[in-house]
Image: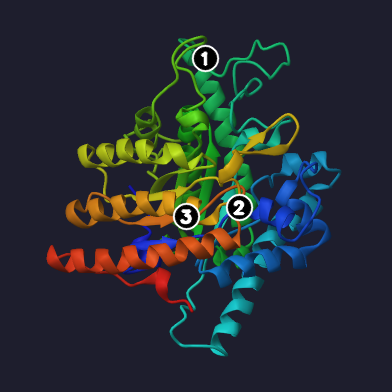
Amino acid sequence: MQTKFDAVLKDSRLALMDGGLGTTLEDVLTLNISQSPLWSTQPVVSNGEAIVQAHLLFLRAGARIISTSTYQCSMETLKAAGMQPTQAQAIMLKAVHLAKEAKARFQEETKERSRSISEKVFIALSLGPFGATLKPTQEFRGIYPPPYGPRKFTSEGMDINSFGLDEAAEHQAIDALSEFHFNRLSVFASDTETWNSIDFLAFETIPLRREVLAIRRAVTDLYSEIRKNQGEGFLKPWWISCVFPDGESPEKSYPGGEKIEIEDLLIAAFREAPKSKSNHLQLMPSGFGINCTNTKYIRALITKMMLFFKQALVSHPWIVVYPNGNETYDEASRVWVSRGEVAGNQQGWAEEVAVVVKEMEEERSQGQSVGGIIVGGCCKVGPGDIAVLWRKLLYIHIGSEKNDKAHGHPTGEIMIILHD
């Protein structure tokens, strides 16, 4: 069972989202947040206007989906930063309202400009993995301490992220991860105004198969409560996007073994799973994606994903793709390392992404195994990159519109080109 993007995005089939919020706060707005355990959430505490301005930069560049500054927001991380529970909850909710404020300001701007500009703006609640709460962060390696994983990170290099054949420990880890994600979601769902401001849930940079399963359980449990107390209309479309450092999943099939494939993550996301604690079959995400991954790996991963959706009996999921810019993050030093001459090359990054989107859009318009595409950027992708990508997507959409007509498919609204 899925809550579909179509209910929110209507006839759109290609939507442009923002880039890396945290790195934009650092690179464009010159905030010093890289050493803060809260990272992009730090300005929510100390400089909310900077968050609003960062959102506005992406909206003015052409993005119509903005992500909240909540990636590392959880009661655990905020408590570690010295906050009381009531303070922590207030900060989590405030981050959503800052995105809402940026949306309102942008829509007011469009009234003073051209009617050809889309006033539709959607807010995605950014939800990082459990690994984002750890120190050092573990999005790219998935080394989680018990009960979330087999062993905590050590500097001696004895790190493992798989339970192997220990099914009991694996199930215990899924329970613990599910509780983490459920508790964090519940903070946002507990405040009606905040929840109503959110259009999508974005579970991002997920490194482990068991965390994919845990997220499905957490969403299922939350949605069963919402459905019972408030009704179907309060359910949000949601996606899970995974991270592929060096083009591969960081998870190994067993300690010392081969790394799992993207197909294993897709099976965890879309094949029928055991019932949740609420005794409901686990929901499937509305979309699946790749983020925080170098652009040079995207095409091969997307090809495997499209093939899976063709073969699996999945009801038109959306593909969400938002790769990193052309720099690599060093987790230990928290410093970005350039890829030589390609670093900062907006045309090059946008061209790489646009080529992949064009191939996806051509296949989507012919086969319809995929509901639509959301594309944007992750770390080190700024408003300038998104503006260049927007221009390239314009030509892709014009071509796909003609292709849809030729094949008798709905053309869809042009979300990405309603922009000066």
Q: In front: mark 3 or mark 2?
A: 3
Q: Mark 2 points at which residue?
A: 20
Q: What residue type is labelled 1?
A: Phe
Up-down: is 222 above or below 152?
A: below
Residue 225 showing in the rendered view:
no
Residue 350's mark?
Answer: 3
Residue at horizontal 39 percent and vertical 54 percent from the top: 354
In the displayed orientation, state which residue is furthest to the front: 341
Between discs 1 and 3, the one toward the N terminus: 1
Label 1 SS: loop
Label 2 SS: loop
Q: Name the residue under label 1.
A: 163
Please indicate whether residue 377 sits to the left or right of residue 100 in the image. left
Q: What residue type is labelled 3?
A: Ala
Could you tell me how far apart the alpha carbons at marks 1 and 3 are, in whole angstroms? 39 Å
* Front residue (pair 371, 348): 348
In the displayed orientation, state which residue is furthest to the bottom: 112
